[in-house]
Amino acid sequence: MIFGESKPDIERKMSAKQNEAAIFPIATPSIASPGAMLGIVLLTENSSYSIWEQTQTALIMLLVLLITMLLMLAASQIHRVIGNAGASLISRVMGMILASVAVANVLAGIKQYFLL
C-alpha cells in the first residue's frame, strides 16, 4: 500500500480491460470484524451494564453503520472529487497507519512476552 502499485490498482486495470467486473463483499469483514463483534458482546453484558447503557451501545453501533453506508453510497461522488491521485494518497496514508499499528502491536506483544 505504501510503495509502488497496490493490488487494487492492478485489479482496476484488469477490470478496465474486460467488459464485466465481479463484485465481492470484501468490506463486510472490515465493518463487522470479530473484534467489533466481541466489543459489542462485551459492552452489552447484562450483569455489567444497564439497559440504558446497552441501548446507547446499540444506537452508536447503528450510527456507525449508517455513516458507513452513506459513505459507501457516496463513494463514486467522493472519488470524482478527490480523483485517482487523492485516492492513491489516502490509500498510502492508510497503509502507513496500518503499518504503525501493526508494529505497535508486535512490540507490545514482545514486551509482554518477555516481562511475564
Image (spheres, grey):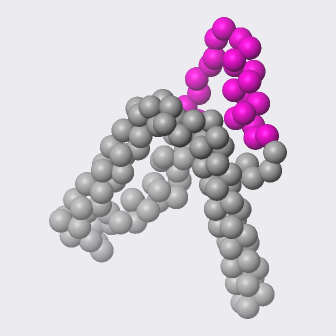
Query: Residue 67 at x, y = what percent?
Result: 35, 46
Residue nearest the observer in this picture, 47 or 94: 94
| Total labels drawn | 0
Q: In this view, does 13 lie above or below 113?
A: above
Q: Is 8 covered by the magenta stretch?
A: yes
Please give the name of the residue rendered at 68% of the width and 51% of the height, measured from the top-left corner. 92
Q: Identify the residue at horizontal 71%, vertical 11% (top origin).
A: 18
Camera-side residue: 77 or 32? 77
Q: Where is residue 79 in the image (x, y as percent from the top left)?
A: 52, 35
> Quick check: can you spot residue 26?
yes
**Extreme-left residue of the structure:** 52
Identity of the residue furthest to the bottom in this view: 115
Q: Is residue 12 part of the magenta span, yes or no?
A: yes
Q: In this view, does 65 lie to the left or right of 105?
A: left
Q: Which residue is drawn at 55% across and 31% down?
A: 25
> Which image quadrant for residue 16?
top right
Against 68, residue 17 (above or below) is above
**Which residue occupies the extreme right position in the image?**
4
* 111 or 78: nearer the viewer: 78
**Residue 75 seen from this side:** no
Give x and y (percent) for residue 107: 73, 77
Q: In this view, does 112 lie above or below 66?
A: below
Looking at the rendered image, the quarter that the C terminus falls into is bottom right
Tell me what residue is drawn at x 75 percent, y 52 percent. Answer: 2
Highlighted range, magenta: 5-26
